[in-house]
Amino acid sequence: QSAATLRQKLQRANGLKDLGIYCADGCSQPDLAAEVFRDAGFVLLPNALDSSQLEELLQGCRREERAMLARDQHRHGNRGSGRYSMGESQQTGHLLHCTEWASLIDLEAVTPVLQRILGEAGYVCAGAGGDFVLGGVHEYQPLHVDLNFPGCHSRADSPVVTLNVAVAPLTWENGPTRIIPGTHTPQAGWLAENWEPPPEDVEPEEWRRFTFCPLPAGTAILRDNRAWHGGTPNLSSETRFLPNVEFAASWWCRGSTADPRYFRNPWVLEG
């Protein structure tokens, strides 16, 4: 389809319907937020960061973008053309050594919700990074999950939760993440090992517009890493950033491993 047709489609219908039902105040409604998360596989926490925190984080994202693009003059990306994982570009696989990301570990509007989602046994901060997509990218990223290790569906509880932060407003045109509500756990009748997103060529057209928009800057997005999600076109002229921090439930982690396959997530898995 032409760029003009795509723009018209997105402007007309991009964004999850009834987005407000997925929102809760992390400070005053942590139980409600955890309930929404368990039902949908994600929850939106408005006003989780103030303007000074957002500015510091945005500048950190821009610094990482400059460093990465200096090494990728043809904009091939490391998550598809024009798409970049900030964590994967690091030798350690993460950005926790940067104060901008470390400051996200214990946010007043997020920690109470994480405590209720990840349980009384507690959790660990498992890493940090996030992604960005350049302006002018017209392609969709295929639906995928961020956690598909054996045993990740052994409980309904989420093993790993990602916190994303909207450092600028997410709009219909600047590449908001799409997510399919309720896909964090297999539907009745499905075996866990067969529960996976459909290929791009058979993904329902309407799913492509199930995106986190419109969302104001400062919104925190908590997402079950098992939920089906993917990137969308950024038709704006600006880079869209979504920095993140990842948290893993203590029941999911049993020590650590030096296995190079798990260099970004070096814990020994449950089961």
Image (tube, rainbow, N blue to C red):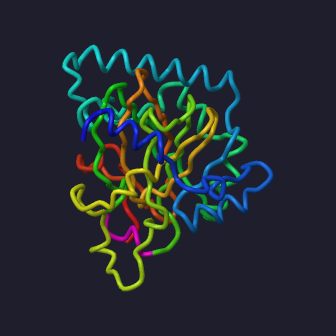
Looking at the rendering, which quadrant does residue 269 occupy? Answer: bottom left
Q: How many labels does the image show?
A: 0
218 part of magenta stretch? no
Which secondary structure is most common in the magenta stretch? loop
User: Residue 18, percent across and down?
Assistant: 61, 56
In depth, the one of 80 and 59 nearer the eye is 80
Name the image quarter holding the N terminus: top left
Seen from the viewer's position, the closer of residues 215 and 14 is: 14
Residue 16 position (above or below residue 86): below
Q: Identify the residue at horizontal 43%, vertical 61% (top origin).
A: 254
Left or right: 89 as drawn, with respect to 58: left
Left or right: residue 99 versus residue 51 is: left
Q: Where is residue 78 in the image (x, y as percent from the top left)?
A: 25, 34
Q: What range of the chain is rendered magenta?
A: 149-154
- Taking depth in this image into account, of 158 and 39 the one nearest to the observer is 39
Q: Is residue 248 above or below residue 58?
A: below
Which quadrant holds the C terminus? bottom left
For the point 48% across and 32% down, the residue is 96
The spot of residue 270 in percent (x, y) is: 40, 67
In the displayed structure, 58 sits above or below 218; it is: above
Residue extending furthest right? 28
In the rendered image, the vertical position of residue 188 relative to residue 142, given as above or below: below
The picture places residue 178, in percent across and down from the top left corner, at 43, 49
